[in-house]
Amino acid sequence: MDPRRLVRWLDVGACILLYMTVGPALILVNKQILTTYGFGYPMLVSGLGQASSAIGATFVVKIMKWQPLSDQAQKMTWSFYRRNMVVVGAAFAASLCFGNAGYMYLTVSFVQMLKAFTPCVVVAMLYVTGVDSPSQKVSLSVLGMSLGTVVASLGEANFNLLGFLIMCCAETAEATRLVLTQRLLCNLRFGAFEGLYLMAPICALWMWGLACFLEVPRVMAKGDFQRIRDHFPIFCFAALLGFAVNVASFLVIKRTSSVMVKLLGTARNAGLVLFSALAMGEEVTGQQALGYTICLLFFGCYNYYKLTETKAVPSQSAADAEAGEAGEELLRGAGKK
């Protein structure tokens, strides 16, 4: 084999390995902080990943200039940022905070199963708001994912209604973010770290701003800031993982494609379900496994049909869509994956 080709394969393999490990590691570390260490404040915890991502993206874009800002970003006015990016950032912050809060009440494996239902909420909201009309095949795939989620939910041995409702809020917030992104930022296609540079600061501001009113008073009343001092290395590790998730996504997108990131993300979630059951001792019933399998099969169909529909549009539009999806994959990374 050509040595250069071997080096390239090893490079791609290393990037994929990094992507497949840092996301689950962040989930497990965040759950450890929220439950085992008793620091049950999802806004403060979620803000760690966004703050580190904002600092890291600023270092990459502004200081080292490894990825210069596009003309669109440079010409963006404060008025436009306030009316559009701030709104999208609020929905994104809600998605991350609710997503982390779900781990306080549900098992890691069940949360990953519920995440497979997110495309259903997205498609429904896009249709209701008139942003997009799904094809018949996509609609049938969504119905299949819904069926699988229902089967998995009914089979959950440690079902918690509050946790389930929190995850419903997380998925609704994520769908809202995607709809707002398409409606408010439809003509903007940010590059990888560029989107993170623009969005992460406002997300961190939303999270920690609200936390000052909703969580910090309780933290001070209970003296829980001591928990940060007692476990300071793990909090720093969570912040670093939040940025590492985005770096890994950037590397995989650059060397493969955003479609590959979606497929790897699906495999990663499935792997985390298996890890939670085998290594962490979380109970996964046969009915849950069946429901999740149904969900994954139809999720594969959903991605396939969406991909074929994307290929049917003109090449320039497809390229723009690829660029936009790459930015969105990075924006999803910090704080939860």
Image (cartoon, rainbow, N blue to C red):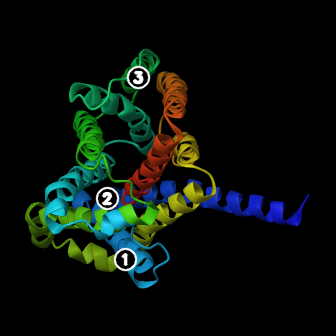
Q: Earlier in the sequence, mark 2 or mark 1?
A: 2
Give the class, few, some or many, for how many residues have Cα within 10 Å of label 1's Cα (few <14, many ≥20): many
Secondary structure at numbered mark 2: helix
Q: Earlier in the sequence, mark 3 or mark 1?
A: 1
Q: Residue at x 38, y 80 (%)?
A: 62
Q: Residue at x 8, y 64 (%)?
A: 213
Q: CA distance from mark 3 to mark 1?
A: 38 Å
Name the residue that disc number 1 marks: 58
Give the mark count: 3
Q: Residue 47: where, in percent of width, then height?
A: 28, 65
Q: Which of the two marks, 3 or 1, is nearer to us in this view?
A: 1
Give the class, few, some or many, for how many residues have Cα within 10 Å of label 2's Cα (few <14, many ≥20): some
Specify the farthest residue to the right: 1
Q: Is residue 196 visible?
A: no
Front residue of 145/8: it is 8
Q: Which of the two marks, 2 or 1, is nearer to us in this view?
A: 1
Which amino acid type is marked by label 2? Leu
Front residue of 193/115: it is 193
Which amino acid type is marked by label 1? Thr
- Give the quarter of the figure containing the N terminus: bottom right
**In the rendered image, which quarter is residue 61 located in?**
bottom left
Name the residue that disc number 2 marks: 34
Q: CA distance from mark 2 to mark 3?
A: 32 Å
Q: Which of the two marks, 2 or 3, is nearer to us in this view?
A: 3
Which amino acid type is marked by label 3? Val
Q: Residue 58: where, in percent of width, then height?
A: 37, 76
Tell me: 117 left or right of 104. Answer: right
Secondary structure at numbered mark 3: helix
Give the class, few, some or many, for how many residues have Cα within 10 Å of label 3's Cα (few <14, many ≥20): many
Q: Earlier in the sequence, mark 2 or mark 3?
A: 2
Secondary structure at numbered mark 1: helix
Q: Residue 210: where, in percent of width, then height?
A: 13, 62
